[in-house]
Amino acid sequence: MSVNRKRFRIEEAIMGEVTMPVAEGGDIGPMHREIMAELRSIRAQMAAGGNHSAVTESVDAAVAREIAESNTLLETYRAQIEQCEKLKVELDLIHDAINRTKREIAVLHGKSFNGEEMAKVNGELGAVVGGTEQATQQILEATEAIDNAATAMSKNISPDQQKLLSEEIQERVVAIFEACNFQDLTGQRISKVMGTMKFIEQHINEMMNIWGGVDAIKAHAPPIVDSREGDAKLLNGPKLDGDVGHASQDDIDALFN
C-alpha cells in the first residue's frame, strides 16, 4: 500500500506536481536517494568552494603585502646605490687629483728640488753676488785712482808727469770697462735661476689648478704677519716698475721745493 509523503522543493522544481510514490514498508524510492546524494554532493562542493575562496583571498593579500614590502626595500637599495655611485665618482676625482699632484711633485723633485739642482741654483746666485761685489770693488778702485790722477794733473807738473798721469787714467778707464763686463755673466746666471724658478712656478700653479685654482688655495692660506722690527720694517725697496706704495724721486724732490 502506497503512502503519501511530504515533497521537497527541489523535487517540485525538477518533477513538477507529480506525486512521488513511496515503496511499501515505508522505504523511500531510489530516485529520492539519488537526489539527496546529489544535494549532499552539491552542498559539499559549495562548502569546499567557499573555503578555497577564503584561502585564495588570504594568499593574495599576503602576496600583495610582500610585493609592496619588496618594492619599498628595492627603492631603498636603489637610492643607496645611487649615493654610492656619486660617492665613487667623487672619490675617483680625488684619487685622480692626488695622482696628478704626485706626478707634479715628482717632476719638481727630479728637476728642481733635488740636491744637485738646488745646489746649482744657490751656486749661481752666490756667483752673481760675488761677481757683482768684485766688479764694484774694481770700479771703485779705478774711480779713486782716476780722481787722484786728475787732482795731480791740476797742479803745476812737468809734461812727463802729465803724460804718465794721462796713461794711468786711461788704464783705469779700461779697467772700469772690463769690470762692467760682470753684468753679462750676472745676466746669464740670473737667467738660469729665473728659468728654474719659472719651472717651479709652472708646476706649482698646475697643482693649484688641480685642487680648484688660486681662489680655493686662498681659503687655506695662513694670514701674512710682518715679523720685522725696527728699521727693517721700513725697508720695502728697491721697487719694481709698476709697484705701488713707493715714493718716487720726484715725490721726494717735491718735499724740498
Image (cartoon, rainbow, N blue to C red):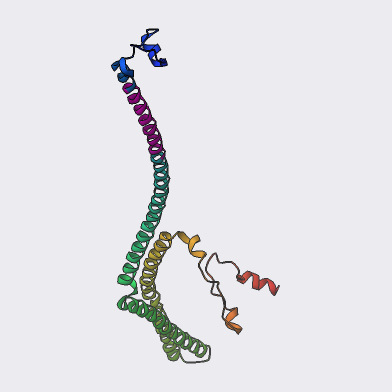
Percent x, y for residue 63?
38, 40
Q: Nearer the viewer, residue 254 or 8?
A: 8
Residue 152 visible in this rendered orientation of the protein: yes
Q: Position of residue 10 (x, y in %)?
A: 39, 16
User: Image quarter for residue 172?
Assistant: bottom left
Q: Is 40 in the magenta?
A: yes
**Relative to the observer, which residue lies in front, 64 or 97?**
64
- Residue 174 visible here: no
Decide which of 183, 152 is in the foreground and name it.
183
Report the label total: 0
Left or right: 31, with 190 as reference point:
left
Residue 39: x %, y % from top left: 35, 22
Membership of 62 in magenta stretch:
no
Q: Residue at x 39, y 43 (%)?
A: 66
Check the picture and name the quadrant holding the N terminus.
Answer: top left
Which residue is painted at 31% across and 15% down in the image?
24
Q: Residue furthest top?
A: 17
Q: Which residues are magenta?
A: 37-61
Residue at 44%, 83% (x, y): give it.
136
Give the prevailing secondary structure in the magenta stretch: helix
* Image quadrant occupied by the C terminus: bottom right
- Residue 190 in percent (x, y) is at 39, 73
Q: Examine the rendered structure and indicate whether residue 149 appears above or below residue 17.
A: below
- Pick the residue in front: 104 or 135: 104
- Relative to 79, residue 11 above or below: above
